[in-house]
Structure formats: C-alpha cells, structure tokens
Amino acid sequence: MSVFGVISMFGGLALFLYGMALLGTGLERASGGRLEQTLEKLTDTVLKGVLLGALVTAAIQSSSATTVIVVGLVNANMLKLRNAIGVIMGANIGTTVTAHILRLSGSESTGFFMAFLKPATIAPLALIVGVLLFLSSKTDRRHDVGQILLGFGILFTGMFTMEAAVKPLAASPSFSAAFTAFGDIPLLGVLVGAVVTAVIQSSSASVGILQALTTTGQITFAMAFPIIMGQNIGTCITPVLASIGASKNAKRSACVHVTFNVIGTIVFFIAGYSIQAMYPLPFWNLPIDKGGIANFHTVFNVVVTLMFIPLAGVLEKIACTIVKDRSHGSETEGMAPFTLDDRLLVSPGLAVEHTREAVVRMGELARKNFISAVSLMRNYDEKEFERINENEDLVDRLEDSVETYLLKLSHLELSESDNRSVSELLRTCGEFERMSDHALNVAESAQKLKKSKSEFSKKAAEQLGAISEAVIEIMDLAIDAFKTRNFTAAGNIEPLEEVIDVMEQTLKDRHIERLRKGKCTVDAAFPFVETLSDLERIADHCSNVGVSVLTYDSDQNVIDRHDYVHKLHKGQTENYLDKYTVYTTKYISRIKK
C-alpha cells in the first residue's frame, strides 16, 4: 500500500472515530441523561443490570463511556459494586450493535427499495438532512437529531474511506503473510487486538477497522478469532484509567471489567481452539466478511456474559481480593456526605442530576443546622454548637465543590435544558448556603445569650418557637420543591413567607414593648431581634428557591422575579390567598394570644 493509501486509511479512521463520537454525543444529549439515570436506579439484580448496560451502551454507542459512568457512580457512592457488575457485563453486549450496523454496508441487495436502504445511499442522505437540521435548528431537539444524523453519515463515510484505502492490500503477499501469522500464532492476534483497541480506546472502532479489512478477502475466521477476543481486553483500558485516584470500590468496578474480559477470553480461547483441534471447523480457513465479524463479536460477548451472570459474586470477591481494604481505622471512604466525580462529566445529563443531589444535601444540612440552632435557644450545649460549626464548614465546602463542578460542566456541549439547569443549580446552591449561614447566626445568638447569663421571657420563648416552626415548614417546602419538582410545595412557599414577614415585624414590635416595660433585659433583647432577622432572611431565601422552581420550566428567557412575586401577593395566582389564610390561622393566631 502506498503512502497515499496509508494517509487515506488514517483519514478514514479519523472520520470514523469522529462520527462515532458525534453520534454518541448526539444520542446522549437527546436522552437528556435519562438513559444513564435509569442505569443508576434500576440495577438491583444482575440480570436487570445486564439488560440496562446493554441498552444504554447500544444507545450511546460506547461501552467505554458506560463503564466510565459506572466507575463514576460507584466512586460517588451512588451505585453499589454488586449492582455495577451486571451493567459492566451488559455493556460488552451493547457495544456489538455498532458492528451489526456496519455490516449493512457489505450486504448485497437488488431492487430500488433495498438499494435505497444500503448505507452507501443512506449515509449521504443522513449527512444532507443532518447538516440542514444542525445549521438551521432553533430548538435543542432538532439540533440533536441533526447531530445524530451527521454522526451516522460521517461514521459510514469514514468506513467507506478505509475500505477503499485497504482494497489494494488484497493483492499484497506481505499483508497476507502478516495476517496468516495470527492463525499460526493466535496469542499474537490477541495481543494486536488488545493493543490497537487500547490505543484508540474503543472496541467498536477497532472491530470496525477489522470489518473494513475483510473487504480485501484475505481475513479468515482463524485470523479474526484471536483479534476479536483481544479487542475485548483492550477496551478495559478506559475504565482502568478512569479509576485512577478513585475510591476502593470504583477501582474494584474497573477490576471487575478487566477480570470479566480476561477470564472470558481465556475460557473462549481454550474452548475454541480445543474444538478446532478435535473437530476441525469447515469455515476455519475461509474468508470472513463483515457479518461474520459482527456475529462472532456478539456470540463471544453473549456467551461470556451468560457464563458469568451466576458468578457475579465470584467476580466481586476477585475484585475485592485484588483491591484490598486497608486496616480498620485508616479507610475514609463513604464518610463524605457527597462526592462530585469528574468521571460523570462524560454524561452531562447525569452530571447535572448528581449535582442536584449535592445541592439537595446542602439544603438538608442547612435545615439540620437551623433545628439544632433553635434548640440551643432553649437548652445551650457547647458540643452541639461545635457540630453546627462543622456542618456549616461542610456546607461551605459543598458549595465550593458544586460551583467548581458546574463551571467544568458549563464548558461542555450542553443542551438548552441542561444550561438552564446549571444556572438554576448555581442560584439554589447559593440560597441554601446562605440559609446555613443564618442558622449559624442563630446558634451564635444562643451562645451570646448563654455567655451573658440571660434568658428570654416565657412569652418571648413561646413566640420564638412559633415563628421557628413556620421557618422549619418553609425550609421543608423549599427542599421538597427543589428535590422533587413539587410545584404544589413551591406554590405554598410564598404565602408562608409573607406570613413569616408579618410575624417577624409583629414580634419585633412586641419585644420592644416588653423591653420598654422592663419585662426583658437588654442582654436578651439584641439576640432576640437578631434571631428574628435571621429567621426572616431564611424565609426569603426559601422564597427565592420556590420562585426558581416555579419559573424553571417557563418559556420566557428573562423573568422579573419581583413582578412575579408582586402578582403572587396580589392574589393573581391560584390558591395564594387560600394558603395565606391557612398559614395565618396556623401561626399568626398563636402569637396574638
């Protein structure tokens, strides 16, 4: 093959890889992370994991991407190692879909309709339609469909270019001799398949290259047999690299992938050559075509998976033996409340959802801090005060992690929906962090009260308890509204916030009156007023969260929050006045007694 042929072949390979990446990205964007979220949630049995792993990998056209996502989920403590094993096995089956798509380019057909369905016809049409949609689209959906079609067309164009470049090899004696060596030294074929796949980090791509080489007519089943098995070992390199620096269980999930493929290859290798030695296969030395490559690739992965489904526990034990736990007391895994893992950035939709869980965790910590801080007003405990400080530090660290993670996420190619989610997460992250700050302020007011050896009057304590209960309820509504997209809860926040505003002003006036009459000391007056201000500010931040949830799905690009809230207060939204009356009866009546 001439220098120009080599250039043409590698140019075709470049197009092939780019088309595959474009196709996978388009499919992931179109799914909005839903496929990966399903993979995360529905893996309670090995069989379910296998099916989900196969479906997700077939959809995103990359077993490497699926296994990297699995490593990330395990590292983030969102997926158990046992649940991950089935997904990893299923990914090997799903990756065979690409080979079956590529085999269509070699199918022989007659008639206009069948010829029209061949990739040689469909690929250019996909490129034409894809370019038109991609360049003219004004919506995410059309843009993603255009990208999928472009990826499909470019993938086959690269395939056709590689096929054209390697056709002269059919008459090359040296090429024939080189591949014959794989039949004589099958371990060399396994090694070549593993190395090539490891370099390009895609078994689908390396199988595609092998399918392109079958057009020379020089590739026999005996030559392809060891190479295909080696390709399944080579694809393990991506999750192995992804597990570097990860948790023990994340390393074990990568170890499971390697163990599964290596043992499967050894078993299949020994069985295959034993059968050939005892009962020579009639097709062993015959040329193999694209369909034969696709079929064997599928048979290998399906048989190995079926063999290991009952042995998932054994794979787990092997992984735990290879990646051992350290001595008790030195292992810190699982102690952090949440881990945002860069490995999940391969799937923006999934990364957005996991960031949402981290932000929810911030809200829950802020709520816990507030409840503890209010309890300090009644019964001060220095250890509890220290725990509140520790939780506040944790919330601050989570905020930094979330903001850094979202910054990385914003640099990726995101759908419009994901872009809006990133903005919403940034805003809500800040709201929850400030709630935690105000909760700490309440704890510090309790500490001042303790140091001054002062205490609130019985009436002041009762009134503070009433408004505190209202604030706990509004925090619950805000967290629930954000966590579950509960629009009912979000709609209840604003009337309760208005009630808390009224309570805060009323209690301040009452407290000033008690202070004027000498029923309360000056040392107790300032902590009480400061606490009321902090409670009112927490309610304001909850209001911001509620409005963010209610306006998130709006088609408007810019929403005037103040105008929106003004409409709420004027009763121009459903049920506002009814809920305001309910909360007035529930809370304001208590402080007026």
Image: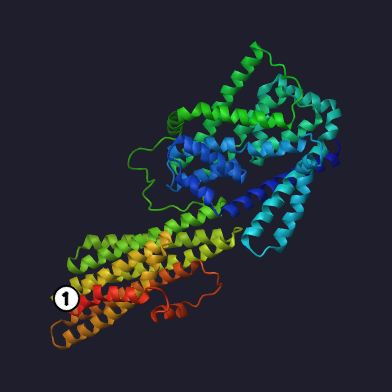
Q: Is residue 470 left or right of residue 119?
A: left
Pointer 1 local density, CA inside 10 Å: few below 14, some 14–19, many at least 20: many
* The C terminus sits in image quarter: bottom left
Q: Amino acid at mark 1?
A: Phe
SS at mark 1? loop
The percent position of residue 47, horizontal first and vertical second, equals: 48, 35
Q: How many marks?
A: 1
- As rendered, which of 361 and 119 lies closer to the eye? 119
* The N terminus sits in image quarter: top right
The percent position of residue 255, horizontal first and vertical second, equals: 50, 35
Q: Is residue 141 left or right of residue 263?
A: right
Residue at 55% from the left image edge and 60% from the top image edge = 418
Evaluate whether residue 260 shows in this view: yes
Evaluate whether residue 432 shows in this view: no
The percent position of residue 19, horizontal first and vertical second, equals: 70, 48
Residue, far top? 278
> Is residue 3 depicted above or below 502 in this figure?
above
- As rendered, which of 4 and 429 lies closer to the eye? 429
Residue at 37% from the left image edge and 46% from the top image edge = 332
What's the colour scheme? Answer: rainbow
Q: Quadrant of residue 542?
A: bottom left
Residue at 68% from the left image edge and 13% from the top image edge = 280
Residue, far bottom? 516
> Is residue 418 depicted above or below 46 in this figure?
below
Residue at 50% from the left image edge and 58% from the top image edge = 405
Residue designated by label 1: 456
> Is residue 466 depicted above or below 118 in this figure?
below
The percent position of residue 57, horizontal first and vertical second, equals: 58, 42
